[in-house]
Structure formats: structure tokens, C-alpha cells
Image (cartoon, grey):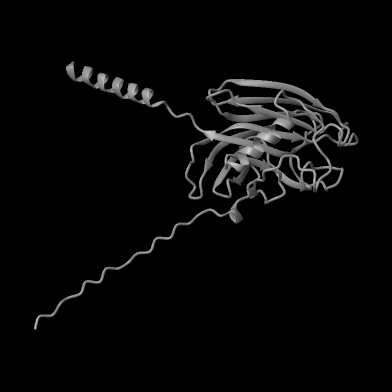
Amino acid sequence: MKLKLLAFVPVVLFTVNTVSIANASIVSVGVFDENVVQANSVDISATAYTAGQVSVDVASAFAAGQGGVIDFDNGTITDSNRLEATFAGGTKTLHVRNDERTWSIGNLGTGTAGALSGGRVLFNGAPDPFPTPYLNRFVFEDVTDQLGMSTGDAVTTFGLIVLDLNTSLNGGDNDLEFTITFSDDSTMSLMHTVPGSFNANDTFFGYQAPSGQSIKEVAISATNNLATDDWAFIVSPSAIPEPGSVAMLALLGMVTVMRRRSR
């Protein structure tokens, strides 16, 4: 009788580690400048793109998985120079780096005082010594999926609220200069003074990239204590060449190769 040999094939189980919402620093929400928990609200829009406009736009983007509002009430910062915010139900993460300062999340309370949403805000620094200007530089790195791979999205709309200050803090007024750098390295700047009045001059600054571009970084120079709330962002897929453009590039490549061979 012949014996049949049975071959045992080992089965290897692969485990995919995904990034869950619980491991992320901040969880984005869909409402800009909410007024249920926090009665305080935006007083002024310093830019042509207003707080009212971004409220509508970011709500639509959030529903479509293409944006959100970072209100600093849902999570923490694990790296004082970096902020990571999940959106699209936790399937995407926006990575923002500060090349100039360290950040911290703090509690300013609810009701009519302090924050614009919930009770917590982002503290962006203070002049040392007053009123020496100091810089924050928000660099939008990339958007990744649950596996940490780039989604190909880039920030095309960004806005935030700069809180005014109690006049007893360093004399009050805060002279700000915003410089926005787009993906083609073009820039736009704005100078604006936020008076020290405590809850009467909370100011919104919002920017949209030109068609076909994205926002590369936002630099803010300030002369007084700086606290921000409700970062609104919208992302769009990075520009992809049209099929005709791809075909033309391929044809040019073939012509170049043929010319080199003929020589």
C-alpha cells in the first residue's frame, strides 16, 4: 500500500494596523462658531471671505468628507509643534506643522467669555518682551488615510478666529500681519489690528486658494498674546493633468528618445 504524504502549508495571517480616531490628536467637527455650548461669537470678519461664508462652506465640505472645523474641544496635541486633525469619519487626517512656535490647548471657559466654540482654544504664544513681534507659521504638510498614505488632497480653504484680549493684558491691542503662501509660491498679505476689548472684537480671517492652487502655509506675526479658535479647512484633490496633457507628455518623451537614438 502506498502512503500518501500530506503537505501542510503554513498559513500566515497579516494584521493591518490602522490609525483610529482615539489615537489622533484632534477630531474635527462640522459646525463653525457653534452657539449652543458657547454664547460668544465672531464679531468681525477682517477678510473678504467672511465667517458667514465659511460656516456654510465648511459644513458642506464636512458632510462630503472634504473638510472640517478644529475647535480644540475634542482631543489633545501630542507634539507642541504639530497638529493632527481627523475628519471624514476618522478616515482622513490633516497634518499641520508650526516651524516657529510651540502650541498648547487651554481652557477659556464657556458662556459669554473666552472661546468661540466649547471652552478650549489654542494658545499660539506671547511677545517676549512686549511688544516685540513674533511669528507663527502654519505649514500644511499633507492629508493621509488610515494607513498613513497620502490621499492626494491639499488645503484650498482655511480660516481661523483670533480672540481679542482683556485690555489689562500687555496693553490690549494686537497688531497682526498675515502672509498666505500658495502652492505656486505666490503670496498675499494683510495687516489688521485686533483691539483689546475682551469679546467685542473676536476676528475671523479666511482665505481661499486661486483656481488650480492650494494653500501651502499661513504665517501670522503678532505683537500681543495670541489665542485662536475654530480653524476651518476644506481640502480638494491635488491638480491632476488632463488625459490630453498626459498623452502629449508621453508623445514628447518618445520623440526625445527617438532623436537621441538617431544621433
- The part of the image, by quadrant, that contains residue 14 is bottom left
| Residue situated furthest right in the rendering | 168
Q: Quadrant of residue 114?
A: top right
* Image coordinates for residue 73, horizontal then vertical, percent: 72, 49
Residue 11 horizontal/vertical position (percent): 32, 66
Q: Nearer the viewer, residue 82 or 133?
A: 82
- 46 is higher (above) or lower (below) than 39: above
Q: Quadrant of the C terminus?
A: top left
Residue 175 is at least partly visible in this image: yes
Q: Percent from the top left, x then y, of residue 145?
A: 51, 46
Count of numbered labels shown in the rendering: 0
Q: Camera-side residue: 247 or 257?
A: 247
The quadrant the N terminus occupies is bottom left
Residue extending furthest bottom? 1
- In the picture, measured across the screen, residue 117 lies left or right of residue 68, that is right
Residue 134 seen: no
In the rendered structure, the answer to whether residue 119 lies left or right of residue 169 reads left
Q: Residue at coordinates 49% horizontally, 41% vertically from top-left? A: 151
Give percent across and percent down for residue 189: 68, 21
Residue at 58%, 49% (x, y): give it: 89
For this view, does 147 lie left or right of residue 140? left
Q: Nearer the viewer, residue 23 or 176?
A: 23
